[in-house]
Image: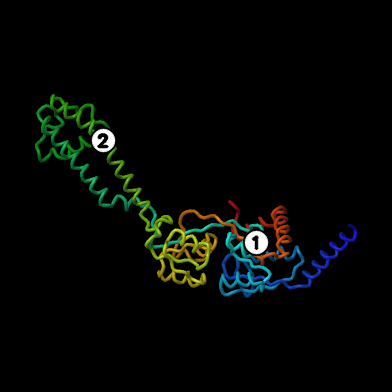
Amino acid sequence: MLYLRLITAALFLLWGQLLSAQVLTVNTVTRPPFSMVEDGRDTGFSLELFKILAERLDWEYRVNRASSFSEMLEGVRGGEADLAAANISITASREIQMDFSHPIFASGLQIMVQADDIREPSLLRAIMSWDLAAAIGIAFLLLFGGGMMMWTFERRAQPYFDRPLKEAWFPSFWWALNLVVNGGFEERVPRTPIGRMFGVVLVVSSLFIVSIFVAKITAVMTVEAISGSVNSVNDLYGRSVGTIGGSTAAGFLDRREIDYAAFSELEEMFAAFEASEIKAVVFDAPVLNYYEFQGGHKYGQTIGQPFLRENYGLVFPAGSPLVEDVNQALLTMQEDGSYDALYRKWFGSQN
């Protein structure tokens, strides 16, 4: 047993020395804010995270920036790279061919639509709609007609209505309006039997008029609020949608049978979006939010909450001995607060 322990310890020591001497190859692809080049330097959340891990594990490494996401993963799958770091979703199909670290980021998909397709609810726009204008017109006609009928019944009995026709139209309308809004005037109650009966009918009818009017305003405002062209995934059918080919977003759109244009690079997809060649983008929420924050808000805006929650991880060739060391270092980062500090640097406080 003693010999076995010595041999095991020697093997671990030898492996550690080999790792120290070996320069690891880290594949990545440009995916701001997880991996990008700024001022000639590789940076981003995922690359800075691995930098901290490498320092703690005393590893040397070099970054190989692939031209596409599939190329990045293929290098890991074929053993040409020791691992990959970017916004790599942990999926069952990828897990079959490669090994993942513990999750390094909780994400999800989101929709971005053209700025022209987004409009905030507007009270003025709702008031100027034809539906509401028609409702207001009908209400005015009813009030005017009710007031003139009361003038007809009460002009010889109630002094308020004792005036010629050319002078009676506005006071009669005003009386009907106050009846609906305030319940009428105590000193101007109808005096004839038919006038009193008609007054009761007007009071009861006013309850329905006010209810219908309020309901109409509510309905118009509701339609105004949801009148954007895209408000959810269900609104993407029949529209010009784009995403990155082979991504989890592309897989989601395939399962929902939503047609889309597949792009190989983010720059290509965002260029098509800015040129209005595609009207909506479905992709990783943090990537779209970063694009919007960096000036993309001039062209579009993310809508709704992230959906299809997923986790990102570092990916290794199947059976890689590096995984366990990385996982232990990740747990240590989460326990000592260094992960939270890095997260706040790139994304602000966690929800």
Question: Residue 11, how many percent across, how many down?
Answer: 83, 65
Mark 1 and mark 2 lie on one chain; the one further toward the N terminus is 1
The circle on residue 152 is none
Vertical side of 158 occupied by 341: above or below: below
**Closest to the observer, 181 or 169:** 181
> How many residues crowd mark 2 within 10 Å: few (<14), some (14–19), many (20+)?
few
> What residue is at 43 percent from the left and 55 percent from the top?
232
Foreground disc of the pair 1, 2 = 1
Q: Which corner quadrant holds the N terminus? A: bottom right
Pointer 1: what residue? 100
**Callout 2 amino acid:** Phe
Question: Residue 147, how many percent across, how many down?
Answer: 16, 36
**Closest to the observer, 23 or 95:** 95
Image quadrant assignment for residue 57 = bottom right
Image quadrant assignment for residue 169 = top left
> How many residues crowd mark 1 within 10 Å: few (<14), some (14–19), many (20+)?
many
Question: Residue 10, how many percent across, how many down?
Answer: 85, 65
Secondary element at tag 2? helix
Pointer 2: what residue? 208
> What residue is at 54 percent from the left and 55 percent from the top?
309
**Callout 1 amino acid:** Phe
Q: Is residue 137 left or right of residue 16?
A: left
Number of labelled discs? 2
Secondary element at tag 1? strand
Vertical side of 160 occupied by 66: above or below: below
